[in-house]
Image (cartoon, rainbow, N blue to C red):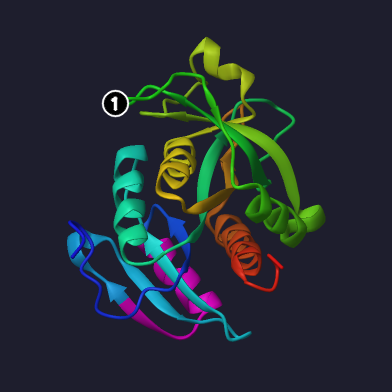
Amino acid sequence: MPARLRPTAPIATAAILVGDPGRALMLAQELLVQPKMSNHARGLWGYSGRTPGGEELTIQATGIGGPSAALVLGDLAELGVRRAVRVGTCTALVPEVEPGTLLDVAEAHAWGGPGSREGTPVRPDAALSRALGAALGSDGRRGIVASLDVLHGGGAPAPVAAGDVADMQTAAVLERGRELGVAAAAVLVVTEGAAGRRLSEDAEESATKRAGAAAAAALSTSSLG
């Protein structure tokens, strides 16, 4: 039995990972037919079911930060997950990346955190990343994410500024996926611009649903050939 998750329903081999439990519920209602709660231990809500196309899918909250996401992904791998897409949020570091953008992560750089190799790029699984890019189409923008322990207002430390956006989890998810043999990729909703302008709640929900739909399509076995 995994250390953190206590599944009450079968876990699919494909999973969407989100930080916020409320976002997990929203995407489960949006993407699954008759979703069943598969975990509520530690407040890490998870849901499993089938998509309208008949694909089994789990949607699992990971909590805040890279360490939590890495631990949850480890538990999911123990439960049989083999493909995962992070659907998260981020803050723009450059003005050309506007709030509402869906960022298709090309690579991530960890800055800080236990055992992190600061600035070393980690890339998503190639096949899953191609499928995600195809599913996003013109709705996505390819970019680089800097993953930080803490996000502060007013920008990021100078070395991080080379990234397009900043978040708290993507580098950990991609690196841990590589270590576990889990194919991992990520799509991020830009919720705050470089100048501090924030996306409205309604616009964030709409963008998250679009990102989730693309993630589900990318995780489909048919999309991966």
**Is residue 12 positioned above or below 206 on the image?**
below
Name the kind of residue labelled 1 in the image: Pro
At 76% from the left edge and 54% from the top edge, which residue is drawn?
A: 139
Foreground of the two, 152 or 76: 76
Q: Is residue 222 magenta?
A: no
Membership of 33 in magenta stretch: yes
Main secondary structure along the magenta-highlighted residues? helix
Spot occupied by residue 67 in the image (x, y as percentages of width and height): 30, 39
The residue sitting at the right extreme is 138
Q: Position of residue 210 (x, y in %)?
A: 65, 63
Residue tagged 1 = 114
Q: Residue at x 20, y 68 (%)?
A: 6
**Quarter of the rendering occupied by the C terminus:** bottom right
Q: Is residue 47 left or right of residue 26?
A: left
Q: Which part of the image, by quadrant, shows the N terminus?
A: bottom left
| Residue in view at x 32 percent, y 78 percent | 37
Q: Quadrant of residue 11?
A: bottom left
Q: Is residue 169 left or right of residue 185?
A: left
Task: Using the rendered view, name the quadrant where residue 216 is placed.
Answer: bottom right
Q: Secondary structure at mark 1?
A: loop
Estimate how packed mark 1 is, as few (under 14), some (14 to 19) or many (20 or more) residues with alpha carbons within 10 Å: few
Name which quarter of the figure residue 211 lies in: bottom right
Part of the protein shown in magenta:
21-37
Percent position of residue 181, x then y: 46, 50
Image mark count: 1
Q: Residue furthest top?
A: 158
Which of 138 and 221 lies nearest the eye of the viewer?
Answer: 221
